[in-house]
Every structure is written in structure tokens, then in C-alpha cells.
Amino acid sequence: MVMATTPAVTAIGAVLLLRDRITGWKAAGLAVAVAGVVAVNLGGPSSGSGDNVWLGSLLVFGAVCCEATYTLLGKKLTANLSPQTIAVWAAAGAALLFAPFAVVQAIDFDWSRPAATDWLALLWWGAGTMGLGSLLWFGGVMRVSGTTASGFMAVMPLSALLLSYLLVGESFAWIHVVGMAAVGTGIAAVAYSDTRRNDEREGS
């Protein structure tokens, strides 16, 4: 539920930090997209409540702020740097940050335990998710406003839901369909706002 606020938090950050303007269509689209993500979360399986809900919620909201910063900082950097450069330096920074912890864990790690499929999954996680995903994302935010990019952040939980059907065998729920439809409608409204604004600029 807390993660569902990611598009809204990113949009607010875009207005405050990048001076983006939220039109009526964008505001409505973001609201519908967030509602769709909430619906998807409500329809998910529950594994019980934690011992410290407030602390857990604050930590998850911290992750939301990090996601928002990832997009907004990337948008700011694309004014002077290419998506490839940003992706490389972001990966290098992450590697330096986590290398000391990885070295400590590697000392006692049983390298024969992971299967070949585990290593392939890890390879895709690095090359696909972090590498190719970062290139596509930064290439996209370079061409759209921060608020428009925030609307597309609602696609992440949607794609995770679809992949959970295909890869994990999660059970189907009709509320997921409602959520997916809401997310799609919200993203369409956000995209329409940008298209309409571009047409008005060309007309003037």
C-alpha cells in the first residue's frame, strides 16, 4: 500500500523540484493510476502482519522516496549527460557502496550452493534490470516531463503482477483486472495531457 504512493510522491517532487506543471488530466490520471495500484495490492495474498507496522511503513516510504529521487535526479542529469553515462556511473556508485559488504559475505559463502539458473537470474538482474532497464528509463525521462514519468511508474507493480502469474503461479483475482484497467486508464490520461500540451504549443 505504501509503495502504491510512488507515482504520487514522484509527481509532487517534480512539481517542487523541477517546476513541472500538473494539469487536470495529469492529476486525474495519477489519481486513477495510484488507485489501480492500491487495488492490485488489496487483491494480493496476505502473509500476516508485522510486529512494528509503523517502523516498517516508514522504511518502505523511505524506499518510495529513493525511487522518486532516482527518477527526478535522472531527469535533471539527462539535461547534460546521456542515458548511457548516467547508467554506468549509477552502477559504479552502487558497486562501490555495496562492495565492502559483499566481500565480507563472500568469505563464508558456499559458492557451490547456487544452481546454474540462480546465476542466470542474477546475471539478468544486473544486465537486464539494472543495465538495460536504466538505459530505457533514463532515455524515456529525458524526453518527457517528470510528472509524466511518474505516471508510468505505476507500470512496475502491474508488470510484477503479470509476471507473478506466469513465473510464480500466483492465483488470479478479479480485483487485479480492475486495478490493471485503472492503471492503464491513468497512464493514458497522463500521456494525453502531454500530447494535448504539445499540440497547443504547435498551434500557437
Image (cartoon, helix red, strand yellow):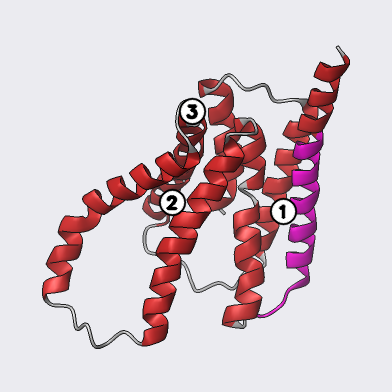
Left or right: 93, with 182 as reference point: left
Is residue 167 shown above or below 126? below
Is residue 204 shown above or below 166? above
Q: Is residue 99 magenta?
A: no
Q: Of the residues tagged 3 and 2, which is closer to the observer?
A: 3
1 or 3: tag closer to the N-terminus: 1
Residue 103 location (% of width, % of height)? 15, 64
What amino acid is at disc 2? Val
The one nearer the camera, 180 or 103, is 103
| Label 2, residues with CA under 10 Å away: few <14, some 14-19, many ≥20 | some
Q: Which residue is mark 1?
A: 36
Q: Which residue is mark 2?
A: 60
What amino acid is at disc 1? Gly
| Label 3, residues with CA under 10 Å away: few <14, some 14-19, many ≥20 | some
Q: Which residue is mark 3?
A: 76
2 or 1: tag closer to the N-terminus: 1
**Camera sees residue 1:** yes
Residue 190 location (% of width, % of height)? 75, 37
Residue at the image point whose x is 76% and y is 38% from the top:
191
